[in-house]
Amino acid sequence: MIIRIASTANVPGAEVISDLQRTYVIHPERRYVLHFTNGDVTLRAFKELFLLNKEVLFYVANFEFFLCKMSLFKHCRFEFVRYPDDTRDERVENYRNIEKRLGGKYISRGVELSFAPDVFASIRSSLLNPELYLSKGSLSTVIYKELTRRLGYEDLKRLAKDAVGTSKEEEAFDEDFDKHLKSLVFTGLVKMKDGLFHRWSC
């Protein structure tokens, strides 16, 4: 099954279900975006959509925590999808006007990044600095940090094991390592070419 990660919660023609809601109702004929923060509501909605064989769209703030929660669903593949966000935000216009007055010219790039950050850049940032997102590092974090250069499978696994300093049995660590590496590859954050793994870059 393919799970799509949307660049915005405001997908045209889709209704939002978020973890802040207490209740929700799934209508089979409608399209939904699951706004994931902790998974309390959105994972229940995901299971319902999965059983209905419906398209699944997530909008995610903390991707590493999302990957950890979604590790239960081993046969899913992730795709990132960029949607135009047509919602007009008065705050964006106000900040642009402030920037224009202070700078004497119109500079909107910083404002746009503040209100509509690059999804991949945010995910890479959360993997490299999980503490900034108030989350603990996981094996995905360790693997991603070790990929400062192209590495083969065994070398990457050895470096990750040394970094974690695990007391787990060899087989248990191998299973965890494979699960986290596959997640990173499926999401496109890590690429493999000629048997070597490396970080995806824009």
Image (cartoon, grey):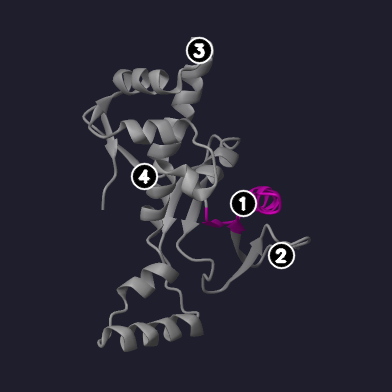
Between the C-alphas of marks 4 and 1, the distance is 24 Å
Q: Amino acid at mark 3?
A: Glu
Magenta stretch bounds = 35-61
Circle nearer the N terminus (2, 3): 2
The residue indicated by pointer 1 is: 53
On whether residue 49 falls in the magenta region, the answer is yes
Seen from the viewer's position, the closer of residues 162 and 83 is 162
Spatial CA distance of label 3 from label 1 is 34 Å
What's the amino acid at mark 1? Asn
Quadrant in which residue 84 is drawn? bottom left
Q: Which mark is residue 188?
A: 4
As drawn, 88 above or below 182 = below
> Mark 2 or mark 4: which is in front?
4
Residue on which disc 2 sits: 27
Q: Are marks 2 and 1 in contact (CB under 8 Å)?
A: no
The residue wearing badge 3 is: 171
Report helix, strand or loop for mark 2.
Answer: loop
Check disc 2 and give the amino acid type: His
| Residue in the foreground of this view, choosing between 37 and 135 | 135
Cα distance between the residues tagged 2 and 3:
43 Å
Of the image marks 3 and 4, the number of the one nearer the N terminus: 3
> Where residue 41 sits: x, y (%)?
71, 53
